[in-house]
Amino acid sequence: MEVQYRHEWKHEIRYVDLLAIRQRLRAVAESDPHAVNGKYFIRSLYFDNLDDKALREKVDGVNLREKFRIRYYNRDPSVIHLEKKSKRSGLGTKYSALLSAEEAQKIVDGELDWMMDSGRPLVQELYCKMRCQGLRPKTIVDYTREPFIYRPGNVRVTFDYDIRTGLSCTDFLDPDCVTVPAGDAPILLEVKWDAYLPSIIRDAVQTPGRRETAFSKYAQCRIYG
């Protein structure tokens, strides 16, 4: 199966930019049907090894890189996704597999032997990289997302803000796990599309004086270690 890579823009924006762009998007795009009152809460657990391979490759701008995370939405652990994000020459793709809450907790606790018999290639790949590369749960990343969809071009526009880090806590199914603001994290505008970006969306997300950024929520959440 051919891998489908997507284009991606990221811009750090101000609150006044968010208000203006949100208003324009509401006129031309639709809110993600999974959103509640136009937004949802995301909790992710990112993996890295003792040498911080994923973090260093991101900071150094390595052309071909990947990172693993486990994620759920709106504080509801009944649907949990294991995801691998890959980057190549600025284009991105994502692979995903479902996990039960029990399976996710076993990964957090280092109980890994079941993974090779899971029948899910991505779970098996994570197992191999945890065993061979030393990947381990590294930090929790929490944030709020406002998502919009524009179906021509398969465009997705999101605002991410209130980014928080779990510091050294990796028990991301624990609702009492304390998170703190990840430094002076910005509001992040992301635009993702397949083959082309329709001009109506390109115009809607224009932010005069704002340049594209390589901001990483995971890297931002590692500022304390």
Image: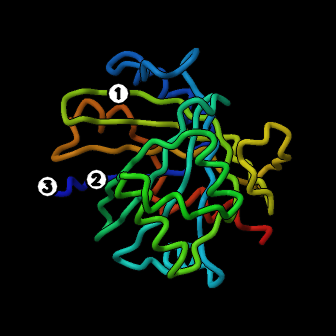
Numbered disc 1: secondary structure: strand
* Front one among 210 and 177: 177
Residue position marked by numbered label 3 in the rendering: 1
Residue 55 x/y as whole percent: 58, 73
Q: Please state if 140 lies on the left or on the right of 26 as rendered.
A: right
First in residue order: circle 3 vs circle 2: 3
Find the distance from the CA under tag 1 to the CA under tag 2. Answer: 15 Å
Residue 221 x/y as whole percent: 69, 60
Residue 191 x/y as whole percent: 38, 43
The quadrant of the rendering that contains the C terminus is bottom right
Residue position marked by numbered label 1 in the rendering: 149
- Point out the frontmost of discs 3 and 1: 3
Instruction: Give, as a three-letter code, the residue at label 3.
Output: Met
Residue 179 x/y as whole percent: 81, 48
- Determine whether 122 is above or below 42 in the image: below
Instruction: Give, as a three-letter code, the residue at label 1.
Output: Ile
- Point out the frontmost of discs 3 and 2: 3
Find the distance from the CA under tag 3 to the CA under tag 1. Answer: 25 Å
Residue position marked by numbered label 2 in the rendering: 7
The quadrant of the rendering that contains the N terminus is bottom left
First in residue order: circle 1 vs circle 2: 2
Residue drawn at the location 58% of the way across and 38% of the way down: 72
Numbered disc 2: secondary structure: strand
First in residue order: circle 3 vs circle 1: 3
* Front one among 45 and 80: 80
Residue drawn at the location 49% of the way across and 78% of the way down: 57
* Front one among 53 and 212: 53
